[in-house]
Image (spheres, helix red, strand yellow):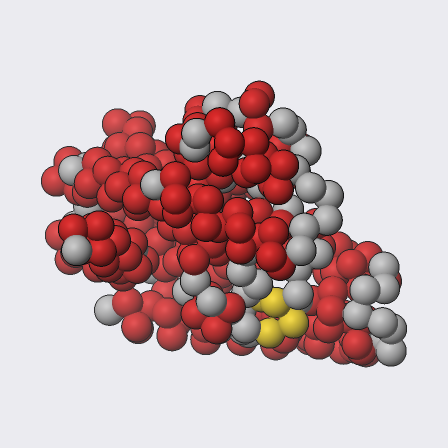
Amino acid sequence: MLNTLRKDIDKSIKAFLKDVKRDYKLHLSSKTLFDGIKDFLLREGKRIRPILFAISYMGYTKRKKYSHASLFRSAIALELLHDFMLIHDDVIDKSELRRGKPTLHRVFNKKMGMAKDNELGPGLSIVAGDVIFALAIEAFLSFDGDLLLKENALRKLTETASYTCIGEFMDVVNGVRKLDEFKEKDVFINYTYKTAKYTFECPLLIGAILAGRDKKEMKKLSRLGLLLGQAFQIQDDYLDMFSSTAEIGKSVLSDINESKKTLLVWKAYDGLETKERKEFKKLLEKDRKTYQDLIKIRKLIKYSGADKYCLDKTVFLLEEARGIYPELNMKRKYLLVLQDLINKVFTRTDSLRNTLHENKRS
């Protein structure tokens, strides 16, 4: 079913872009803007958020007949919200790759005949991201259902967007904070705001809101979403540190290059002895890091055991999240699909943790 849901999401995105082209005439007023948005939205992605939304709604609704077309049109709002966040994040981080292709600001600079580091591309990308956010609201309003429920769900969507932007602000500010000031709880607050709320909690909640579920069920879904979101961000940080660009489709070692205070960084600093800790702090807080600096930081992180700690923490969060499944009143068919999706999202964590523990024993 997951493959079918993903195909339905991709199909809905393509249909939505056709409607945008027809209604807004973007290809006539600004072909560069429309082509940039179209290229970015059609890039291959996991589609986790809209799939979670669809699973939640279908798993909870008591309606025997409803428009699948309107459901998937509203579901893509979660993907558009994600794309809006990614585009702005890439501008802030000065990233070069996203989903295996040049970031949108690089694309715009090339289209406009500018150097790849010209400020025009980032400026245009910010505007494109804003357009995509507005289109996300329009897509969401396509849902064919109870108006009050739709209003409540939209309120949750916009509230989540606000939390995510706050999380992004915190993430940037944390990049210039001193390591000595940072605590593990600060890392998890950032993970919750920037990632967990909009990646897992919001899609699950708004699907259930539209289906008319009660507050008791919402509390369980919220807890599930936050646990999964925190685990997801730790996994993402780990892959940024130890994977290749080819594997994840974006630049690696970017987090430490930007001095981001991830769980890996916090645990490494907390666990290193005085000499190594001083070297780690000095390297991480350098304004301009060489590739050799980044490799040294990565080696110190492994030396500290922070890699094992983070993988174990991810598995702990996942086990706690999976313990919530039996408590959910979701239709069994869709609960199994939800479990299948989560297992696929975290396949890398289970594999990496097993390999790491095997290496430690040998």
Q: Nearer the viewer, residue 222 or 62?
A: 222
Relative to 255, is 101 above or below? below
Percent of width and height locating residue 204: 35, 45
Which residue lies at the image location 39% right of the left edge and 44% below the top edge?
303
Note whether residue 43 is visible: yes
Q: Nearer the viewer, residue 47 or 357?
A: 357
- Identify the image quadrant of the C terminus: bottom left
Relative to 348, is 13 above or below? below
Question: From the viewer's perspective, is 273 left or right of 348?
Answer: right
What is the total number of numbered labels drawn onto the structure image? Answer: 0
Percent of width and height locating residue 361: 16, 51
Q: Nearer the viewer, residue 146 or 320?
A: 320
Which residue lies at the image location 67% right of the left edge and 50% below the top edge?
289
Percent of width and height locating residue 309: 32, 39
Which residue lies at the image location 48% right of the left edge and 56% below the top edge?
240
Note whether residue 17 is visible: no
Percent of width and height locating residue 75: 45, 58
- Identify the image quadrant of the N terminus: bottom left
Instruction: Kindly indicate the quadrant of the structure image that contains residue 280.
Output: top right
User: What is the residue that sits farthest to the front in this orientation?
Assistant: 275
Relative to 287, is 63 above or below? below
Which residue lies at the image location 85% right of the left edge and 59% below the top edge?
119
